[in-house]
Amino acid sequence: MAEPFDTLMQVQLHDTTLDQLRHRMDALPERAELLEVERRRTALTAATAEVRAQVDDLTARQRSLEDRIAAAAARRHEIEQRMRSALAYAPRDLETMDHEVGQLAARQAQFEEEEIILLEEEEPLDVALAEHQTTLGGLGAEASRLEAAIAEAEAGIRDSIASEEAQRTAWAAGLPTDLAERYERLRSHLGGVGAARLVGDHCDGCHLTLSSVELERIRHLPPDEYATCTQCDRILVH
């Protein structure tokens, strides 16, 4: 078949290549990998925040215990200082002070024991926090690597798209307006393929076989007249 149908097939060839390039850009494997890395970072950041909240709670409780220990120790020291001036107090008063010193010592020991328990509870949380931070750092570096790889791949694909578009525009300029408009309408709702060749007895667009009657009709069409696939309605170049 003569022009303009060979030109139309060149336009279709470039359109198909452009669709493939755009799909390749959307389907870069690094893009899916980056989404997974970001999902892991989000989940780990939330887990880190939860662990940090637990550590902060334990730290606050430890400070409260430290304040109580300090208060008990100060009160105990004050009473013991007064007891050293034994001549100024009656035996009953000394006995009362001694009892209070014992209570303060017991309370201080209890607070110190509770503080040790809190420190033991905090230790694995501190380890988990350190591990989370290390993992987050690694994920951040991986995300940066993938973003750079995506940017590089996209730049290369954009260059190819620009080249294909320029060639496509040059070929499309040679199409009659009515043929170009029909092609664009068909392409828009037939998955990007508006024109296909007749290969043997089947349409290369839908890959379905045409009837012998239709094939005979197409063979007798004038060279400047295109056919339409009876199966998919695409422009059929023969």
Image (cartoon, grey):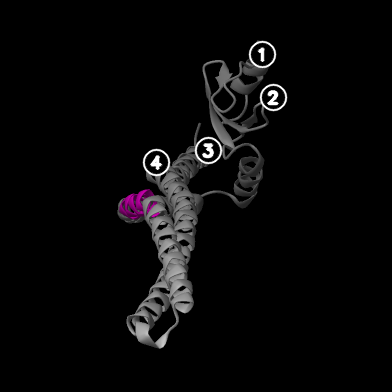
Q: Earlier in the sequence, mark 1 or mark 2?
A: 1
Label 2 secondary element: loop
Label 4 secondary element: helix
Q: Position of residue 91 (x, y in %)?
A: 44, 77
Q: Earlier in the sequence, mark 4 or mark 3?
A: 3
Q: In percent of the image, x 63 and y 44: which residue is there? A: 188
Is 59 left or right of 206, judged from the image as shown?
left
Q: Amino acid at mark 4?
A: Pro
Q: Earlier in the sequence, mark 4 or mark 1?
A: 4
- Crowding at mark 1 (Cα within 10 Å: few <14, some 14-19, many 20+): few
**Main secondary structure type of the part rendered in magenta:** helix
Q: Amino acid at mark 1?
A: Ser
Q: In percent of the image, x 68 and y 13: which residue is there? A: 213
Q: Position of residue 228 (x, y in %)?
A: 65, 30
The residue pinned by badge 4 equals 29
In contact (CB < 8 Å): disc 3 and disc 2 = no
Q: Which residues are magenta?
A: 122-136
Residue 113 visible, this angle = yes
Determine whether 122 is above or below 227 in the image.
Answer: below
Q: Earlier in the sequence, mark 1 or mark 3?
A: 3
Label 3 secondary element: helix
Q: Amino acid at mark 3?
A: Phe
The residue pinned by badge 1 equals 211
Q: CA distance from mark 2 to mark 4?
A: 39 Å
The residue pinned by badge 3 equals 5
Q: CA distance from mark 4 to mark 1?
A: 43 Å
Count of marks placed on residues: 4
Residue in front for this viewpoint, 219 or 138: 138
Which image quadrant: the C terminus?
A: top right
Q: Quadrant of residue 224?
A: top right
Label 1 secondary element: loop
